[in-house]
Image (spheres, rainbow, N blue to C red):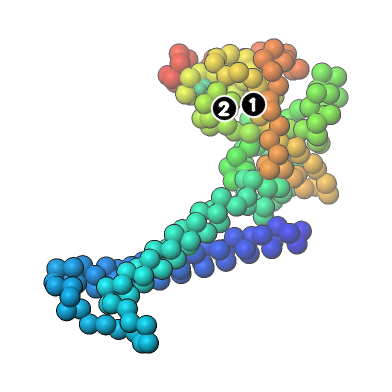
Amino acid sequence: MMIPVAVSALHGTLIVLGSLIAAVGAVVMLVNLWAIVPARQGKLIDRPLVGLPAQVTRRKFFGRSLLVGFAGAMTSFGGISLAFLWPNLKGGFGGKVSLATPYSEIVAQIAANRQPFYYAPGRFYLVAYDESNPNGKIYASQGLVAGGLMALYQRCVHLGCRVPFCQNSQWFECPCHGSKYNRAGEYKLGPAPRGLDRFPITVANGVVTVDTGVIITGPPRGTNTTGQEPEGPFCVGQVGQTH
Ligand code: FES
C-alpha cells in the first residue's frame, strides 16, 4: 500500500517541479533572446566586456545563459513527460485498480442492467463469467476469473478502438471495422485477429481489484467457451456503419 502512495506523490512532485523549471527556463530564454537580437543589429567590436577577471563579451555571456535556459527547459520537459508516462499505481490504468463499488453491487448491476460493469479510469469492462464452466479453465488458470467476474480490456485488438457493448446482441461490437466479440470477449466476427485482451482480477473482502499493469493476450480465434449466440440485432452493421 505504501508503494503506490509514494509513487503517486513522486508523480505529482515531478509535475510541479517540472512546470516550475519550464517556466523559469522559458523566462530566461525570452530575456536572453531579447538581449541578443538587438545586439546583433549593431557593431560587435564596440560591445562592452563584462565579468572579471576572465573577460567575456556580453554576447557570449547571454549566449551561454540562453543555452543554460534551453537545457533547463528541455530537462523539465523530459521530466514532465516521464511523470505523465509513469504508470499510475494508485487507481488508474497501468496499475492495480481497486474499485470503490462493492463486489456484490457490481454483480447486481451486471445482472439487472444486462450489460457489463464499465470502469472508464481502468479502461476495462467487468463481465459475468461462470466459474464452474469446464471450458473456462483457460481463464481460471491465468487468474482471469474471480468471484464469477472477468476483466476485459476495452481496446479492440484489431486497431485499438474502444469496443462498446451492444445491449441488443449482448456482444461487444467495434464501431471502427465491425469486429465482434461475445460476452466473454471471445472473437466472433470481423478483422480482429483474436479475442479481447484481459487483466488478472481478484476479489477479497468484497473488494474487486483488477491489475491493469498486466495485459493478458486474448484467446485465439475459434475459442468459444460460452457458446453464446447473438441475442438480438447487431448494433454495428456493415464495416464502419452503425444502426
Ligand atoms: S479497430 Fe475494431 S474492428 Fe478495427
Farthest left residue in view = 42
Callout 1 amino acid: Leu
Q: Residues within 10 Å of mark 2 (few under 14, many from 20)?
A: many
Mark 2 secondary-structure assignment: loop
Q: Earlier in the sequence, mark 2 or mark 1?
A: 2
Quadrant containing the N terminus is bottom right
Circles 2 and 1 in contact, beta carbons < 8 Å = yes
Residue with the mark numbered 1: 196
Residue at 57% across, 31% down: 155
Residue with the mark numbered 2: 156
* Mark identifier at residue 78: none
Which quarter of the figure has residue 73?
bottom left
Residue at 76% across, 39% down: 201
Point out residue 239 in the picture as x, y percentages from the top left corner.
45, 16
Residue at 69% across, 12% down: 222
Mark 1 secondary-structure assignment: loop
